[in-house]
Amino acid sequence: MTQVLRAAAIHTGKQILLNGWIAIADGKVAAIGTEDIDPIYADAQVTELEGTMVPGYVDIHCHGGGGGAFGGSGEDALAAARTALRTHLNHGTTTMVASLVTGAIDHVAESVRTLGPLVDAGEIAGIHLEGPWLSLKHKGAHAPELLKAPTPEDIATIFDAHPGAVKMVTIAPELEGGIDAVRNFVARGAIAAVGHSDVDYDGAAEAIDAGANNVTHLFNAMNSIHHRIPGPIIKFLDDERITVELIADGVHLHPGIVKHAAETAGRGRTIFVTDSMDATDMSDGDYMLGSLEVSVLDGVARLKSNGSIAGSTLTMERAVQFAVAEAGLEFEDALAAATTTPAAALGRTDIGNLEVGARADVVVLDPSLNVTKVYRGGELAVER
């Protein structure tokens, strides 16, 4: 049955409609307009919404939430994945890429094999491998004994576990075989994301020339900026060929850095990610991130072993609020970083926007940018 949603304002991802409406049929946006509803939809169910309609949020880097983490095998792993998806759906994320932490090659391959059917079914938009091809110097919350240089054989083992499931790989391109691995990932249709890397300015340029097209959580787990040794960050911000992830939570990045980086990279290249772990929407306490023990205090996750930040408890709802209220970004720029830009990075035009033909993923926001309702594929999934 066709339904029509109306609101005082709609941000479609391309335009802003005042007193707008969206017609939904078969789970997709069938028409959009302003003022009077097209007579063709005279018999449709009309829902008047209080607030602003925006596209569903798209998170391309998330490890879990609500006590569930992505990874492992069997029915328990599927249940944990769906718990994480539901947790973030409650905060407006209608498209999720499931991120896996560093593990043994066979273990990572088994996780890909387990989660692959969720990719096929559209429950998740793909799998992100954050490890094991990372720099020991910038390992962050990754088990050092499992880090290694990439080989074509290991890459094939993981990718072939469920062909088409892996959509992004974080790589330290300075590792032996790293540049060839970047080319390999891109040839397989995956995003090659530079991260957890000791690469310098010239190495960053070489990786981009080889096809790297995203940066995993810019500033974190990489060399910083120095006036004589610029490191990779300046190159990443300046090069139009690459998108940059920002964890906009005030823990990983200062508000001023979020603003500066987002404005430098621009609306089409800035991507907000949560990098959240299973402690998201849970109480403080002790958790595991892969094989590592994590302590969460006041919502900040840190490794017990050395105090390093270990992912986050961020939601995309909070990231957008933080970017606007604390970092001072324009709402349209923050919204693009949570919707259209990550969707484009995935090569998707059917998500991250509310234009005709897109999946009807709708988030309703109140004036404080709190999520009040979420529709996924035209179905009301969350009402707060």
Image: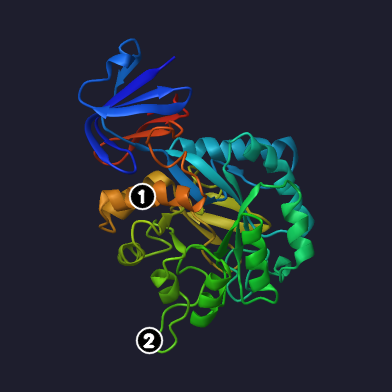
Residue 195 on image: x %, y %: 55, 67
Residue drawn at x 28%, y 41% as measured from the top left: 15
In the rendered view, does 149 fall on the left or right side of 261?
A: right
Q: Which mark is residue 336?
A: 1
In front: 119, or 111? 119
Residue drawn at x 24%, y 38% as measured from the top left: 367
Residue 66 on image: x %, y %: 54, 40
Q: Which residue is mark 2?
A: 227
Mark 1: amino acid: Ala
Residue drawn at x 47%, y 25% as measured from the top left: 27
In front: 368, or 293? 368
Mark 1 touches mark 2? (CB < 8 Å): no
Residue 246 on image: x %, y %: 42, 60
Instruction: Rate crowding at label 2 as few (under 14), some (14 to 19) or many (20 or more) other CA atoms within 10 Å.
Output: few
Q: Is residue 86 visible?
A: yes
**Closer to the camera: disc 1 or disc 2?**
1
In the rendered view, does 111 fall on the left or right side of 316?
A: right
Residue 74 on image: x %, y %: 75, 39
Q: CA distance from mark 1 to mark 2?
A: 31 Å
In the rendered view, does 353 fall on the left or right side of 154?
A: left
* Residue projecting furthest to the bottom: 228
